[in-house]
Amino acid sequence: MNKIINDVHYHVWSDALHLRQLARPTPDKWDRSTYVRAAVVMAWTAFETALAEVLNAQRIGGKFRENVDAAVYASGLAPLDWGQGIWQSVAHLNACRVDYVHRTAAGTDLFPEASVADGALQTIRNALTDLYHNAGKAPPIWISDDSDRGWTGSGKDGCYAYGIAIHGRVDQDAPDTLRVAFVDKRGEHIHAYHPSGADPNVLAAELLKNLREPVSTIRVYRGDSVELEWILRMRGAP
């Protein structure tokens, strides 16, 4: 699935998902544990900044629990129960995260399995959903994302083929023919030619829906002039 990243929290959350996915197939325990610990830290960053936003708080980090409780109280929301359930899991996750970032003492497990990242992501997902509901708001869509492509190769190397569709027997060289194109890591490519009466927005939306690889731009040309251009913040695009 291609991801359009239009939210800073989602950007960091997708980083965590990517790191978690890198950890899953990695046989080397050193590499795997590096990805897992980094995934936990990035997921927590997305969590903490999203908490600050929904609670309209200047500071959440540092004395995390005390700052969250103060912000919840200031927002007039029901207090959180740190002794059980969702928020007890958050407290345990924060202790793990602090170990990774600040302590790395002899007792810290520096070789966590990928399941630790799975648990961290789910704990954060549950906590944000609970807090947004507590605040009477819909949870952000990005927290439902739980997938990533993982490593996609070195980029431009290898052999690739691009097909071009010609609709309605149009003259490709006519000055009013619509030409749909996209830009990926290997450059700009023509996707299709359409009759002049087609709606450029519909053509661009159809291409976006059917893309299998990330792109940075979709353009619709009328002859040699750009009729429409969409700049996309798609993860993995150039």
Image (cartoon, rainbow, N blue to C red):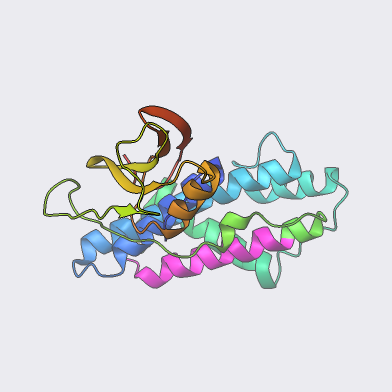
Q: In screen coordinates, is 238 left or right of 146?
A: left
At x 54% / y 49%, what residue is drawn? 202
At x 42% / y 68%, what residue is drawn? 116
Span of residues in magenta: 111-130
Q: In screen coordinates, is 88 left or right of 71?
A: left
Q: How many marks?
A: 0
Residue in front for this viewpoint, 142 or 111: 142
Asked whether 116 falls inside the magenta stretch, the response is: yes
Residue 231, above or below 19 = above
Q: Position of residue 227 (x, y in %)?
A: 47, 32
Q: Position of residue 50 (x, y in %)?
A: 63, 46
| Residue 110 visible in the displayed image | no
At x 18% / y 66%, what residue is drawn? 28
Q: In screen coordinates, is 223 left or right of 66?
A: left
Residue in front for this viewpoint, 205 or 174: 174
Residue 13, above or below 177 = below
Residue 96, above or below 227 = below
Give the main secondary structure of the magenta stretch. helix
